[in-house]
Amino acid sequence: MGSQQVTKRVIDPYGLFCSKGVWYTLAYCRLKKDIREFALDCIQDTRPTDKYYSIPQTFSMDDYFKTGWHIITYGNPVEVNIWFSSEVARWITRRKWHPSQKVTANKDGSIVLKVTVNGTMELKRWLFQWGPECEALSPPEFRKEVAEELKSAAGKYKSVKQ
């Protein structure tokens, strides 16, 4: 999906999963020599091969997804701190968003959510849904990325008349 180029791949499927209404296969990609997620609706053609494979006994889909925010697990581990206002704190604290999450409550009713994820793209998109009720605190690179994307989005609305 990233490059939107059609490529031929030989994959060894490890399992199927559904995320937000889209079905995927988690598979070892022989081209990239790595485990990848493949959206089934993006696969144009399939053919069986005579190549045999076995799923490593130590492989676990649950463990595979623990390091990402949702399904994208690319990138180095990064500890992220996000502040949420007292207005939305109860929505954040009522559910387990990530296995690594830690929540610190502040006296004013706001909270800070700390997670360690491999790659922040999905986390950033999730963060945007909370609008002005949240703030990326750290690391500085993540905070800067969020600020730049929000500035770009706000720029699209400059012509809106009050």
Image (cartoon, grey):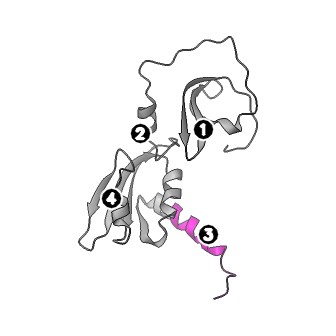
Tags 2 and 3 in contact by the CB under 8 Å rule? no
Front residue of 119/125: it is: 125
Which SS class for mark 2? loop
Disc marking residue 153: 3
| Of labels 2 and 4, the one closer to you | 4
| Left or right of 24 in this view: 110 | left
Of mark 3 and mark 1, the one earlier in the sequence is 1
Report the amino acid beneath label 2.
Answer: Lys
Residue range corresponding to the magenta coloring: 145-162
Q: What's the distance in space between the residues labelled 4 and 3, CA to CA?
A: 28 Å
- Whether 61 is drawn above or below 156: the answer is above
Amino acid found under the numbered disc labelled 3: Ala
Residue behind mark 4: 93
Question: Number of marks in the image?
Answer: 4
- For the question of whether residue 79 can be seen, the reply is yes
Q: Are marks 3 and 1 in contact (CB under 8 Å)?
A: no
Residue pointed to by mark 2? 66
> At numbered mark 4, what does the secondary structure look like: helix, strand or loop?
helix
Residue type highlighted by circle 1: Trp
In reply to whether residue 161 is colored magenta, the answer given is yes
Tell me the quarter of the image containing the C terminus: bottom right
Pointer 2 or 3: first along the chain = 2
Task: Please name which of the two marks, 3 or 1, marks the residue nearer to the observer.
Answer: 1
Q: Residues within 10 Å of mark 4 (few under 14, many from 20)?
A: some
